[in-house]
């Protein structure tokens, strides 16, 4: 004889519980299938991220030096330089130099743009001569420009002439930080690209390593050439 309902005893609903469990499992399966389909679809239709500038970065290795070049210029050095994308745009290219994942230096090249004084005032200059309107020639890095200040003179940023070139001097900077300056001119370097189009470069170099030497900025200056 079948047992009837007993007062205050829970009713067994095994069939309903099984049905509910199957529905839940089916829902999870469908959700997982839909998620996989979504990721496949978005992966196939994702648009490539646009770079901050159209600058193309390339590297060639010749002997102990590497040649780094982009759409506008090229230079050589013995260590690895890469473009810092988040600080690069159509009028400025920022390069950083690495050795075994340690950053050693930073170089900023402004093109047809004169930055704020804060980015121009440095303690040293690399005097350069412009050759054939498309390359540079350099022999040395100047002494700190504070040497041009008179004894007792207030140490404020000002325009000075040192090593036969004019620069904005930051007399109290302890960094090995410099700007390229044309001999008998200033930091505005007027060159031409390979198609004859004029372009004005302003180049700053900052050594962030523990043992700053003039080799790297001179390597860059003497191999710098427009494209």
Image (cartoon, rainbow, N blue to C red):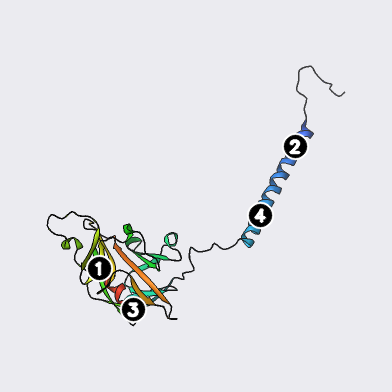
Query: On the image, numbered disc 3 is attached to which residue?
Result: 135
Q: Nearer the viewer, mark 2 or mark 1?
A: 1
Query: On the image, numbered disc 4 is attached to which residue?
Result: 38
Q: Farthest residue to the right: give it.
A: 1
Q: CA distance from mark 2 to mark 1?
A: 83 Å
Q: Quadrant of residue 186?
A: bottom left
Up/down of 41 relative to 78, above or below: above
In front here: 17 or 91? 91
Q: Is residue 183 left or right of residue 11?
A: left
Q: CA distance from mark 3 to mark 2?
A: 78 Å
Query: On the image, numbered disc 1 is attached to which residue?
Result: 166
Task: Tell me if label 4 and label 1 are in contact, CB under 8 Å.
Answer: no
Q: CA distance from mark 3 to mark 4?
A: 53 Å
Q: CA distance from mark 3 to mark 1?
A: 19 Å
Q: Is residue 55 left or right of residue 144?
A: right
Upstream in sequence: badge 2 or badge 1? 2
């Amino acid at each position: 004889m079948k047992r009837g309902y007993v007062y205050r005893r829970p009713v067994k609903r095994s069939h309903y519980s099984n049905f509910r469990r199957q529905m839940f499992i089916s829902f999870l399966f469908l959700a997982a299938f839909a998620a996989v389909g979504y990721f496949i679809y978005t992966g196939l239709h994702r648009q490539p991220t646009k770079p901050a500038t159209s600058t193309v970065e390339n590297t060639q290795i010749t002997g102990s030096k590497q040649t780094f070049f982009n759409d506008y210029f090229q230079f050589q050095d013995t260590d690895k330089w890469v473009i810092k994308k988040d600080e690069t745009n159509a009028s400025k290219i920022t390069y950083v130099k690495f050795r075994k994942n340690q950053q050693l230096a930073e170089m900023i090249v402004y093109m047809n743009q004169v930055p704020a004084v804060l980015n121009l005032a440095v303690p040293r200059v690399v005097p350069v001569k412009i050759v054939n309107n498309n390359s540079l020639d350099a022999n040395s890095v100047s002494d700190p420009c504070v040497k041009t200040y008179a004894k007792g003179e207030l140490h404020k940023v000002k325009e000075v002439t040192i090593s036969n070139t004019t620069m904005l001097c930051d007399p109290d900077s302890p960094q090995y930080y410099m700007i390229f300056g044309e001999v008998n001119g200033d930091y505005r370097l007027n060159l031409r690209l390979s198609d004859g189009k004029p372009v004005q470069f302003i180049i700053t170099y900052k050594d962030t390593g523990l043992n700053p030497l003039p080799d790297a900025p001179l390597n860059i200056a003497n191999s710098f050439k427009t494209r």
